[in-house]
Image (tube, rainbow, N blue to C red):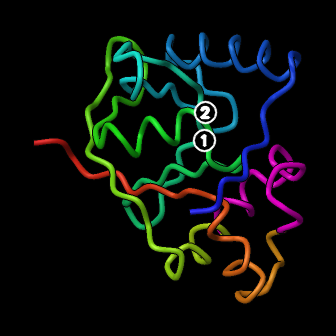
């Protein structure tokens, strides 16, 4: 796992707080969802806003900024809650192998490139499979499965 992490600046953090608040109320902006995960160090539940990608009925979490705090927490917890406050659903998560990431990354970039273009290491929706494979280790991708 690559350790790249594009930390958001103050403006991005403030915007994410507002967008997360809206997502927790059930108001999605361009596919945003509220994600809640237990912190790996503090044990406190942490909330962030994410873009949930659904491909053929399977949900994926992509961390375009790299090995972020929320991605590390998801990896450690293995279980998350996603959705608005009154309709959250629990899901188990598993990390996708780098070899399987290009198809998901291409779909993710096709939908949200305008939003994440500065954080994905030069990748675009038109990047070749080879370029996507090269960038894959630096972009965590998780598959969601219903929690038992």
Residue depicted at 82% across the width and 49% down the height: 119
- Name the one closer to the observer, 1 or 60: 1
Crowding near pointer 1: few (<14 within 10 Å), some, many (20+)? many
How far from the left and from the top, in percent, is residue 111? 72, 56
Measured as percent of width and height from the top left, residue 97 is found at 45, 73
Which residue corresponds to mark 1? 51
Location of the C terminus (image quadrant): top left
Q: Is residue 11 magenta?
A: no
- Compared with residue 57, is residue 27 higher up or lower down, i.e. above or below? above
Q: Secondary structure at mark 1?
A: strand
Q: Using the image as rendered, state which of residue 28 and residue 16 is in the foreground.
A: 16
From the viewer's perspective, tell me whether residue 137 is left or right of residue 60: right
Residue occupying image coordinates x 71% and y 77%: 132
| Residue 113 vertical placement versus 46 (above, below) | below
- Mark 2 and mark 1 residues within 8 Å of each other at the beta carbon: yes
Farthest left residue?
A: 148
- The residue carrying pointer 2 sits among few (fewer than 14), some (14 to 19) or many (20 or more) residues within 10 Å by Cα, namely many
Q: CA distance from mark 2 to mark 1?
A: 5 Å
Q: Which residues are magenta?
A: 107-123
The tag earlier along the polypeptide, 2 or 1, is 2
Q: Can you give x and y, in whole percent of width and height, for residue 144 in the image?
A: 34, 51
Q: Which residue is mark 2?
A: 32
Look at the picture and state if 125 lies above or below 111: below
């Amino acid at each position: 796992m690559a350790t790249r992490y594009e930390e958001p600046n103050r403006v991005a953090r403030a915007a994410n707080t507002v967008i997360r608040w809206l997502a927790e109320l059930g108001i999605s902006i361009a596919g945003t969802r509220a994600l809640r995960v237990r912190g790996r160090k503090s044990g406190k539940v942490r909330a962030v806003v994410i873009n949930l990608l659904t491909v053929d009925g399977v949900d994926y979490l992509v961390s375009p900024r790299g090995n972020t705090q929320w991605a590390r927490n998801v990896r450690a917890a293995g279980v998350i809650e996603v959705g608005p406050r009154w309709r959250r659903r629990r899901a188990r998560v598993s990390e996708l192998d780098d070899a399987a990431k290009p198809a998901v990354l291409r779909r993710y970039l096709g939908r949200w490139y305008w939003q994440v273009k500065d954080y994905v290491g030069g990748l675009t929706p038109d990047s070749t499979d080879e370029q996507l494979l090269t960038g894959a280790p630096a972009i965590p991708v998780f598959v969601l499965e219903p929690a038992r």
